[in-house]
Structures are given as C-alpha cells and as structure tokens.
C-alpha cells in the first residue's frame, strides 16, 4: 500500500490517500476504482470514526481510497457561545470546492496512480453526506466550475453514496443552530440560505446514481431526509438504491466494533450496508 497525505484548496484541507501499488505477482497494469470518503461532524469537525476505518474497509475490497478532511474550525471553537467563529472556514461553498478539487486531483493523476477515472465514487456520512449530496446536485453548475477553476468533468462523481446524510436543513430556519453557523456562516439562517445547502431541492438530470442508507431510529437526522432524496431521484428518473434499517442510532458508521465506542453503535443489520453497496456498484459497472 502507498500511504500519503496532501493538502488542497486555499484553506489547506487534508487528504489521506490509501493506494494499491502495482505488483508483478498480481497485475502490474491493473487500474483501481476509487472510493472518496467524506466524514461527518456537523461541519464543526471531521469524525475519526468515519475516516480511516472506512478507508481500510474499502481498501480491502480492492479500492483506492482518499479520505477528505475538509476544513473546519474544530469542535472546541463552538463550545463557547460568547466566542463563536465569525466566518467559519466550513461555510458553503468552501468544503464543496475542496471535495471537487480532490476529484480533479485524482483524475489528473489517473495514470500515475493507476485509477479507473470513470469509477470514482464519493461516500459521505452525516454532514459529509450533505457535502456529497451537494456535489451530486451541483457538479454540473457553471458557477461551481468557475469557482473550482477546472473543467466540471474533472470533478464529476460517477456515483454518490450517502450514509444518514443531513439532506434537508430547512426545518431549522430562523432558529439558532451551531450547524447552521458552520455551514452557512449564520447562527440563525433564513430559508434561502438553508435551501441552498439542502440537496433534496436540487436533484436534477445530471445527478449521478446514488446509494442511500439510513436508520429509522436516528434521533439527530431523520430518515425522512433520505426518503426525500430518493423521491427526488425517482422524480428525475435518476438511478438510486435506498435502504432504511429499522434499528440504529445516528453515526453507526461500519456498525461494528471497529467504529463503535458505545454498544448501541454496533448493529448487525445495519452493518450489511457495505456488502449491499458493493453489490450495487458492481451492478452499475
């Protein structure tokens, strides 16, 4: 395995790469699909539980992996209400630019890193699922191409995978919210600001095929967000697969001991999402 880190964007977001290396004993010319992993954390930090353990799971399944630690202020910056960030580095569209530039970097190095450029999937958890949804609905927009400074095809995701994603933020309009501050730069955001960062309202004919999963018991992000996104995909005649597990708290990640610090974060039923996803991706090829 080739393991290294890089930075990207004006705020130096961190990307960690886990790449297979060519071997004469396997196939020195083999090219690999890529799983880009985007952790959650309410746009205030990026979760360790949804980073390297996820990367190693997909690396073992024959994927190159890139974990994107988009820039955040860090959780401590939000612990004192009297001294909250004035202009968070995580506010839209900064993380979206960092994610888009990551995909461009992968395609720019497709030969050097033995990448199948038409098999780049992006997997996001919670707030990371929001970010992946935003890339899925906005990648073809001219305004984003101008901001990224690269051709939109270079950062087009081939598939998006959304795990318990926060996909509709409009329910919190005109209420003070730290997540609202982190994503919009406003402690009390209005409907227009929150609509802009709610992917369910922007699904279109260019949105890539999506695999979506959630748990019905999630107390932080309602499963309705995933249902709404799936319905929007259906209305636009876009391919998707949706799984709602009855049991499971928010943030179950791999739903086993590798990502659980509490007993209720392990769930044998929800842990099946990885194999279901691999089956779905294989059917997409």
Image (tube, grey):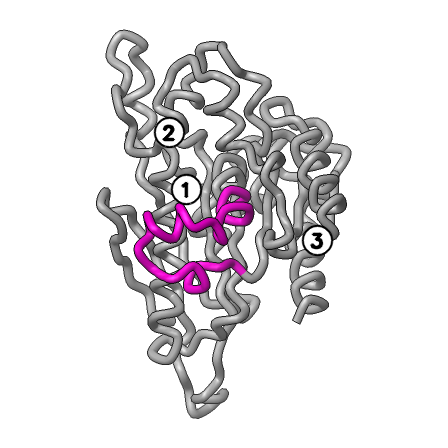
From the viewer's perspective, is the residue at label 3 or at label 1 nearer? 3
From the viewer's perspective, is the residue at label 1 or at label 2 nearer? 2
Query: So how many labels did they put on this image?
Result: 3
Q: Is residue 73 magenta?
A: no
The quarter of the displayed image where residue 104 is located: bottom left
Q: Residue furthest front?
A: 142
Residue at horizontal 49%, vertical 53%? Answer: 140
Among numbered discs 3 and 1, the one appearing first in the sequence: 1
Image location of residue 107, percent across then percent down? 39, 69
Q: CA distance from mark 3 to mark 2?
A: 31 Å
Q: CA distance from mark 1 to mark 2?
A: 13 Å
Among numbered discs 3 and 2, the one appearing first in the sequence: 2
Residue at horizontal 38%, vertical 53%? Answer: 145
Q: Which residue is mark 1?
A: 48
Q: Which residue is mark 2?
A: 44
In the image, taking residue 268 as reference, residue 166 lies left or right, namely left
Q: Are marks 3 and 1 in contact (CB under 8 Å)?
A: no
Residue extent of the magenta highlight = 132-157
Image location of residue 78, percent across then percent down? 33, 19
Label 1: how many residues lie within 10 Å, few (<14), some (14-19) or many (20+)? some
In the image, taking residue 204 as reference, residue 26 lies left or right, namely left
The quarter of the displayed image where residue 176 is located: top left
Q: Residue furthest bottom?
A: 24
Label 3: how many residues lie within 10 Å, few (<14), some (14-19) or many (20+)? some
Q: Secondary structure at mark 3?
A: loop
Label 2: how many residues lie within 10 Å, few (<14), some (14-19) or many (20+)? many
Q: Secondary structure at mark 2?
A: loop
Residue at horizontal 53%, vertical 71%? Answer: 118
Residue 238 is labelled as 3
Q: Are marks 1 and 2 in contact (CB under 8 Å)?
A: no
């Amino acid at each position: 395995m080739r393991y290294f880190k890089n930075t990207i964007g004006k705020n130096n977001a961190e990307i960690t790469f886990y790449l297979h290396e060519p071997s004469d004993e396997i196939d020195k010319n083999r090219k690999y699909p890529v799983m880009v992993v985007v952790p959650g954390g309410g746009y205030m930090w990026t979760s360790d539980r949804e980073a390297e353990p996820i990367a190693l799971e997909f690396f073992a399944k024959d994927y190159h992996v890139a974990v994107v630690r988009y820039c955040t202020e860090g959780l401590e910056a939000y612990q004192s209400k009297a001294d909250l960030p004035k202009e968070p580095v995580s506010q839209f569209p900064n993380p979206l630019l960092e994610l888009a530039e990551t995909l461009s970097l992968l395609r720019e190095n497709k030969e050097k890193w033995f990448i199948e450029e038409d098999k780049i999937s992006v997997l996001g958890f919670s707030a990371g699922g929001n970010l992946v949804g935003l890339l899925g609905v906005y990648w073809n927009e001219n305004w984003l191409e101008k901001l990224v400074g690269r051709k939109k095809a270079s950062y087009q995701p081939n598939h998006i995978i959304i795990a318990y994603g926060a996909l509709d933020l409009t329910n919190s309009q005109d209420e003070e919210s730290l997540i609202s501050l982190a994503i919009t730069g406003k402690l009390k955001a209005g409907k227009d600001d929150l609509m802009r960062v709610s992917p369910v309202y922007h699904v279109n004919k260019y949105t890539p095929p999506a695999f979506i999963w959630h748990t019905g018991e999630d107390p932080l992000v309602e499963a309705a967000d995933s249902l709404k996104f799936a319905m929007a995909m259906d209305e636009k005649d876009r391919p998707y697969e949706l799984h709602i597990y009855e049991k499971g708290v928010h943030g179950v990640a791999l739903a086993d001991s590798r990502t659980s610090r509490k007993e209720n974060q392990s769930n044998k039923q929800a842990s099946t999402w990885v194999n279901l996803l691999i089956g779905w991706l294989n059917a997409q090829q």
